[in-house]
Image: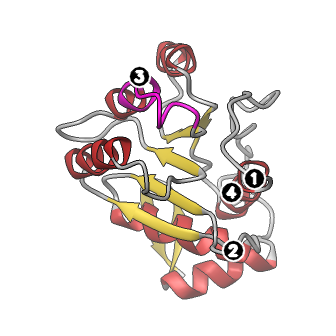
Amino acid sequence: MSLPLVLMIDDNKSDLTLAEMAFAEAGLLVDFRGMHRSEQARDHLGALAGDAGAVLPRLILVDLNMPRVQGVDILAFLKTHPRLSRIPVVVLTTSSSLPDRVRCLALGASEFQVKPFRLDAYLQLIATFRRYLEGDGPQTDRPAGGDDAGPRPSDPEGPAMDDGAQVIQSRLGYRWDFGRRRAA
């Protein structure tokens, strides 16, 4: 039995590395493939659309704001191709803009998630994607309540990280806060 394929499209290579580690730390056994050039990702997805024998991702994570080809363009492309339209797409972005959220959900995103600033919250978010990886095929129903990563802690350091967050932080070699890196 092959592992479910997860494709993540994000122009930030560190975000790709972090997500791959988070899937592993959450105990989600997947074939994780990260693409940091959105135009190459679009071309790859176009090739998948035309190849009836190709293995399709069980889940696609896409950043919204990328150079050249925006995440919303990739989402629109996916949802207009019959072979790709049933693949769940989660927009995972730093944007908390209501118009961005509305547009992505209207285009067919399964979820619109704001990247959590805290590593332990990021790990918890990745763990929720288990629902897309179980079962026999793509799911098209949008999960209830899947539209935000939740409140931000008022304390910038927040509570102590859980074990999973500490493991990933040690592997990365620095403390991860989206948008900034600090020495571990």
The reply to whether the magenta stretch includes residue 7 is no
Q: Nearer the viewer, residue 118 or 23?
A: 23
Q: CA distance from mark 4 to mark 1?
A: 20 Å
Element assignment for label 4: helix
Query: Disc 4 vs disc 1: which is toward the camera?
Result: 1
Residue, disc 4: 126
Residue, disc 3: 80
Q: CA distance from mark 2 to mark 1?
A: 15 Å
Looking at the rendered structure, the kind of residue marked 1 is Asp
Q: Where residue 36 sits: x, y (%)? A: 30, 58
Neighbor class of circle 4 (other Cα within 10 Å; few <14, some 14-19, many 20+) is some
As drawn, the label of residue 29 is: 2
Looking at the rendered structure, the kind of residue marked 3 is Thr
Looking at the rendered structure, the kind of residue marked 2 is Leu
C-beta proximity under 8 Å, tags 2 and 3: no
Residue found 24% across the figure and 54% down from its top: 37
Residue found 34% across the figure and 58% down from its top: 12
**Above or below 109: residue 172:** below
**Above or below 121: residue 81:** above
Query: Which circle's residue, 4 or 2, is located before the other in the chain?
Result: 2
Element assignment for label 1: loop
Quarter the C terminus occupies: bottom right
Looking at the rendered structure, the kind of residue marked 4 is Ile
Q: CA distance from mark 2 to mark 3?
A: 29 Å
Query: Disc 1 vs disc 3: which is toward the camera?
Result: 1
Q: Which residues are magenta?
A: 76-86
As drawn, the label of residue 136 is: 1
**Above or below 81: residue 136:** below
Q: Nearer the viewer, residue 116 or 5?
A: 5
Q: Where residue 103 sits: x, y (%)? A: 48, 15
